[in-house]
Image (cartoon, grey):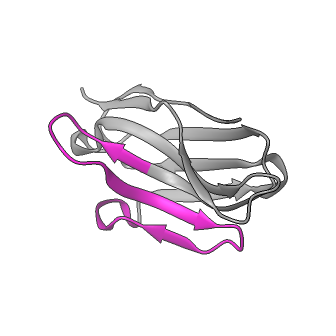
Amino acid sequence: QVHLVESGGGLVQPGGSLRLSCAASGRIASINTMGWYRQAPGKQRDLVATMTSEGRANYGDSVKGRFTISRDNAENSAFLQMNSLKPEDTAIYYCTADLRTPGSIWNTAYWGQGTQVTVSS
């Protein structure tokens, strides 16, 4: 069984910063892509940022230049540094990992429970 646990969400004023963390644990053989999506009330879940195990990053257009994703492959962890936060960044942020479990030849996407980020004065 695999678990993804997010941390670091909270309330921050516009222009502030937050750092999210995601740790994957359990029976994991390898992780390909890890990253973050977000979902605001009444909206679809959108890409925030992802990073491959080789370090290639992909960002949603609305966060480019403000958010930075990083990974610690040895610790099966991913991080999202969020700067210059705006009220429209308010959402539940979900960690996701595309990974392979021992004995499987396929990658499967796993999701965390989400962490709330609220940007408000």
Q: Report the quarter where the N terminus lies.
A: top right
**33 displayed left or right of 121:** right
- 45 or 102, which lies in front? 102
Number of marks drawn: 0
Q: Position of residue 107 (x, y in %)?
A: 63, 61
Q: Residue at x 24, y 38 (%)?
A: 40
**108 displayed left or right of 60:** right
Q: Position of residue 17 (x, y in %)?
A: 46, 40
Q: Check residue 48 for magenta coloring.
A: yes
Residue 41 in which image quadrant: top left
Q: Report the quarter where the C terminus lies.
A: top left
Q: Position of residue 21 (x, y in %)?
A: 61, 39
Q: Which residues are magenta?
A: 37-64
- 12 or 116, which lies in front? 116
- 64 or 39, which lies in front? 39
Q: Residue at x 35, y 45 (%)?
A: 38
Q: Check residue 63 for magenta coloring.
A: yes
Q: Residue at x 48, y 50 (%)?
A: 36
Image vertical order of residue 68 relative to residue 89, above or below: below
Q: Residue at x 59, y 55 (%)?
A: 108
- 64 or 13, which lies in front? 64
Image vertical order of residue 2 relative to residue 121, above or below: below
Q: Position of residue 25 (x, y in %)?
A: 75, 37
